[in-house]
Image (cartoon, rainbow, N blue to C red):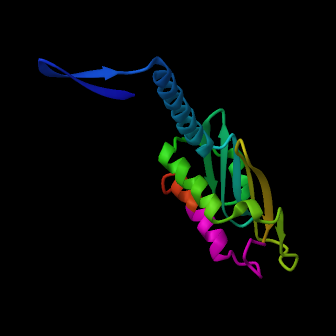
Amino acid sequence: CSLRFARSGKTKLTLNVRLQNMKTIITMLAWITIVATTAQADDKPDRLIINLGGFDGPSYELVLSNGVLWYKSGDYIFQLESRKAEPIQPSDEQWKNFRESLDQLDVWNWKTNYVDLKVLDGTQWGLTIAYSNRTMTIEGSNGYPGSKDAQPSDLFNNFLSAVEQLIGGKKFR
């Protein structure tokens, strides 16, 4: 855009917008819109499955299917099969916060398998998540990232907190 001031008898303002500059502005606005839309779309994964539980304790499952997040809970892992899943609709902000938490917890660099062979019965868990630019599958059986024994680490508990925030405070531990 350019402004030109001209004086002829009385002061008047003439706005001279060149066609080329308008094309540039329109292109920039379109690019900004695409980037903003992509950023929002990338906050919600294409695929998400999270499960946590055991034979003798509370068990949970989250599955993203056809754009809907489904939540199940039960007193033990085998009870999940007979439970009806509850749909949960996280807000765009909750998805964004969840993605940021995953990045802050550095889940992309967690090992793919955590097992404590000293424990025969206990807690199994899994995470499968796919975004347009990252995919990860992690499993655990009585072992957790950041833990040297069969107890969940602060790192893993922070992950569970991020899951609970995503699902609006419902229990997932």
Q: Is residue 99 left or right of residue 136?
A: left
Query: Residue 95: x, y in percent?
Result: 55, 48
Instruction: In the displayed orientation, state which residue is furthest to the front.
Output: 8
Say whether residue 147 is magenta.
Answer: yes
Q: Is residue 143 left or right of residue 101?
A: right
User: Is residue 55 something that shows in the picture?
Assistant: yes
In the foreground, 133 or 138: 133
If the image is split into quadrants, where does the N terminus sit? top left
Instruction: In the displayed orientation, state which residue is furthest to the right.
Output: 117
Residue at horizontal 48 percent and vertical 52 percent from the top: 168
In the foreground, 13 or 77: 13
Say whether residue 158 is magenta.
Answer: yes
Query: Residue 36: x, y in percent?
Result: 53, 38
Q: Is residue 165 left or right of residue 9?
A: right
In the foreground, 23 or 101: 23
Is residue 59 positioned above or below 17 on the image? below
Q: Quadrant of residue 142?
A: bottom right
User: Is residue 170 something that shows in the picture?
Assistant: no
Query: Residue 158: x, y in percent?
Result: 59, 68
Residue at horizontal 55 percent and vertical 40 percent from the top: 40
If the image is split into quadrants, where does the C terminus sit? bottom right
Query: Residue 16: x, y in percent?
Result: 35, 21
In the foreground, 122 or 96: 96
Is residue 14 positioned above or below 172 on the image? above
Is residue 48 positioned above or below 13 on the image? below
Is residue 171 positioned above or below 86 on the image? below
Instruction: Magenta stretch: give its range.
Output: 143-161
